[in-house]
Image (tube, helix red, strand yellow):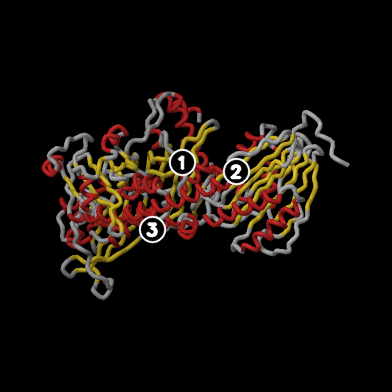
Amino acid sequence: MRDVARAAAGTGFGSDLLAAALVQGMRDTGACVGAVYLPEPGEQVLRMAVVSGVPREISAPWERAALGAPTPVADAVRGQRLVWVGGQEELARRYPQLAMVLPYPFALAAAPITTDDAEWGGLVLQWPGSHSAQLCPRERDAIGDLCDRLGLLLRAAADSGHSVVHGTEPRLVPGPGTGTSGPPEAQSAVAFAERLPGGSCALDMDGRIAFVTTTALDLLGACLPDLLGARPWEALPWLNDPVAQDRYRAAVLSRRPTAFTALRPPDRWLSFRLYPDASGISVRITPASAARAPDRPPALHALPSSATGRTAALYHLMHLAATLTQAAGVQDVVDRVADLVLPATKARALALMTAEEGRLRIIGYRGYTAELMSRFDAAPLTSDTPAVRCLTTGVPSFFSTFSDLKRAYPPAVLQDDMAAWAFLPLITSGRPVGSLVLAYDRPHPFVPEERAVLTSLAGLIAQALDRARLYDAKRRLAHSLQAALLPHALPRVPGLDVAARYLPAAHGMGIGGDFYDLIRLDDTTAAAAIGDVQGHNVQAAALMGQVRTAVHATAGSSPGEVLARTNRLLTDLDPGLFTSCLYAHLDLARHRACLATAGHPPPVLRHPDGRTEVLRLSAGLLLGIDATATYPATEIALPPGSVLVLYTDGLVEVPGVDLDEVTDAFADRLARAGDPTVEALADTLVHDAQECAHRSDDVALLLVRPRQLTRPPPARPA
């Protein structure tokens, strides 16, 4: 490894060593596809820097991976662990969006690239569909070695001042392959292929025809110059068929033979069998009788687009549609559109705009500078610009050159150094919601088929944006309600240090019924409460406010009586939701606490010497079930320097793991946390929950630490 570091530091390190290490790692693990992702500076995004084994047409939608997105590489980097997906069934269960777009048999591993002092990115490796459902120890070790090697290369490059910087597109490198033969062997191979019955051709890993026999030319009805270097579906319009390109992608990704039949007009059916390996695809072409031909109409004779083929465009549209279904707020839609639309359309820049208060506001962009966007932001809807006109009329505009744009808008001045533009209205249910601008750095002929695809793309974005705006409005209302119901500040109680935290749910509305409270009763007594109302909606938040009100109204009574009265109130209200709650009466003069719980997770006590104890109290029923329920109380010692930790289950729960087990693990973390201030301790305890990918519940946390009173309390009456 030290030799690798010296090589990296001494060569003005670029992506060469990174690419070589990836290909060697693919050879060591037997993987057929590999990619290295590096973090995007200033963003929570991973960018594909190097890829091997697939053409860019297939890898393009995956060139950017948001760190918070449910993808294998994001999960691996975020969780600093190896992610293994052993087959299509597991992929569909864990990553349904990915499985919907790539319904092919393959196995996949993703792993973080780290060194002892830093995190550098992520690695993705893919195996053919014939791979076993489990990684063998040798493969697992090889993946670890590859990640170590990549991490060392990246660290050495950074130390030498030559950090790897990914370009606008990932570097595509050949896979391990099988090597090539010399000229005599090549001649013999050609002669061998020509003697076989039927036709043969070879595709490189980018899908382009590298070799074709005479018989194949005859069967395809084409000339050699028209085919060499071209993709079959581009050179032969009758092969521009979703089935043909789907079988090609299946062969590339699964590394398994695939087959399909196609009609060569007017009436000749041909059978195609594809045999892939790491260096390309061998294709056998034979006549297919009408009886064996599929019962389906001929492929549409669509003109191939200069940007993407028809089926490639459908592939990107399907991926975009699947991704946008998971988008929540407006910013989420903006990020996903920016990540996916540029590779799908081959555009160099985009701007996404919405109409707000009579102006066209830019809500997201990619490929443009902030300074340029500020010039166009907030244009009045009365101005005569392409973006405004397409919004107000609902008619898209396509300009293949700046001359075309200048003829339509004489005042136009070239400011973005682009050469062609598409202005697309975002319309849903007949209502305009915004505009999408796509810009190309070269003149771009928008053929009719591509215009239809771009218009469909704008429709998908419009629907997602409209849903996201409604979602954001509901969330703002819900958060305003919740903020009004939770305490703005905790009261100051002599002799008591307190800290509280609230984290909204990681998914959904980000609102729930978790609450905490601290109530000052007199100079030496206080009450602490924490609870969790079932649900994550406005109703749950409203009920949480009613529970807090009931607890405040009865505070000072015994803990069992506080919960019993609150329970009777909720039972009378019959909200249809249940609530867990824990109430603690704190006697700071006697250094005692009395606690009662209504089905709430057990509190944890950290003793002054650092030992921790899970207080498994006798629990009463959840609030709101039975008006006659009783709540036994338990008294404990609470000496100065101890910490009583009250929390809701979102802080500790792990899907599929017993609550007692995760609570014990939480107590262990608390014991190892040292003796910081309660504020620092609260930050430490919520850190893991913030980083947890599976967290779907909100979190409330309340810490109370008694101090030694500086003056004795007044004597209590006998």
Q: Residue at x 30, y 64 (%)?
A: 260
Q: Residue furthest front?
A: 717
Q: Position of residue 667 (x, y in %)?
A: 70, 43
Q: Identify the mark nearer the N-term, 2 or 1.
A: 1
Residue 463 seen in render = yes
Report the mark closest to the observer, 3 or 2: 2
Q: Identify the mark nearer the N-term, 3 or 2.
A: 3
C-alpha distance separating marks 1 and 3: 27 Å
Q: Position of residue 520 (x, y in %)?
A: 70, 41
Nearest the eye: 302 or 539? 539
- Judged left or right of residue 538, residue 529 is right
Determine the secondary structure under disc 3. loop
Circle 1 is placed at which residue position? 122
- Judged left or right of residue 564, residue 293 is left
Q: Amino acid at mark 1?
A: Gly
- Judged left or right of residue 631, residue 104 is left
Q: Amino acid at mark 2?
A: Pro
Task: State the image quarter where residue 437 is shown.
Answer: top left
Circle 3 is placed at which residue position? 256
Q: Amino acid at mark 3?
A: Arg
Report the mark closest to the observer, 2 or 1: 2
- Judged left or right of residue 64, residue 651 is right
Q: Position of residue 229 (x, y in %)?
A: 21, 48
Image quarter hosting the C terminus? top right
Determine the secondary structure under disc 2. loop
Which mark is drawn over residue 485? none
Look at the picture and state if 608 lies above or below 325: above
